[in-house]
Image (cartoon, rainbow, N blue to C red):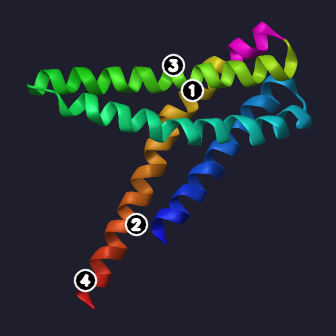
Amino acid sequence: MVTAAKKTSQVVAHMAIAFAIAYAVTGSVVFGGLAIIIEPVINVLLLPLHEKAWLAIRAKSSSTRDRYLRIAAEKLSQTILHMGVAFTVMYLATGSLALGGMAALLEPVCNVLLLPLHDRFWNNLEQRLNGNMHAV
């Protein structure tokens, strides 16, 4: 149940970020709505594949230093993934390289900064619920 709520909340957070950026960049509610539908869905579909691939890569870490370098590379890769999706969606929607570029810069920064806070909230909630369930 918590996993479903977390995933739903994650989609809503992506949608809000996508709308805010598309609206701020274009001034259009229509493009904001288009971004809500397309961009977050693509990211939510791609991110589990990205995480699975990086889990395998991180598992091969032989030292603490190597582990940290792989985590940094994973975050950079995640940012590039978000940039590519944001650019593609905005470019296809507007035909503008400039607007695509602006979305490509803003969207991943917002996601990389805000989504870990989102995940931390849900992980803490799940731990509290599991802790309370074990106490009963």
Q: Amino acid at mark 1?
A: His
Circle 1 residue: 82
Magenta stretch contains residue 98: yes
Residue 130, numbered label: none
Q: CA distance from mark 1 to mark 2?
A: 27 Å
Q: CA distance from mark 3 to mark 1?
A: 5 Å
Q: Amino acid at mark 3?
A: Ile
Q: Amino acid at mark 2?
A: Leu
Q: Earlier in the sequence, mark 1 or mark 2?
A: 1
Q: Residues within 10 Å of mark 3 (few under 14, many from 20)?
A: some
Circle 2 residue: 125
Kindly state the secondary structure of the residue where label 2 is placed.
helix
Q: Is residue 74 left or right of residue 106?
A: left
x, y percentage for residue 136?
A: 27, 91
Q: CA distance from mark 2 to mark 3?
A: 30 Å
x, y percentage for residue 110?
A: 57, 32
Kindly state the secondary structure of the residue where label 4 is placed.
helix
In this orientation, does residue 135 appear? yes
Q: Which residues are magenta?
A: 96-103
x, y percentage for residue 108?
A: 56, 27
- Whether 117 is drawn above or below 29: the answer is below
Q: CA distance from mark 4 to mark 3?
A: 41 Å
Q: CA distance from mark 2 to mark 4?
A: 14 Å
CB under 8 Å between callouts 2 and 3? no
Circle 4 residue: 134
Circle 3 residue: 80
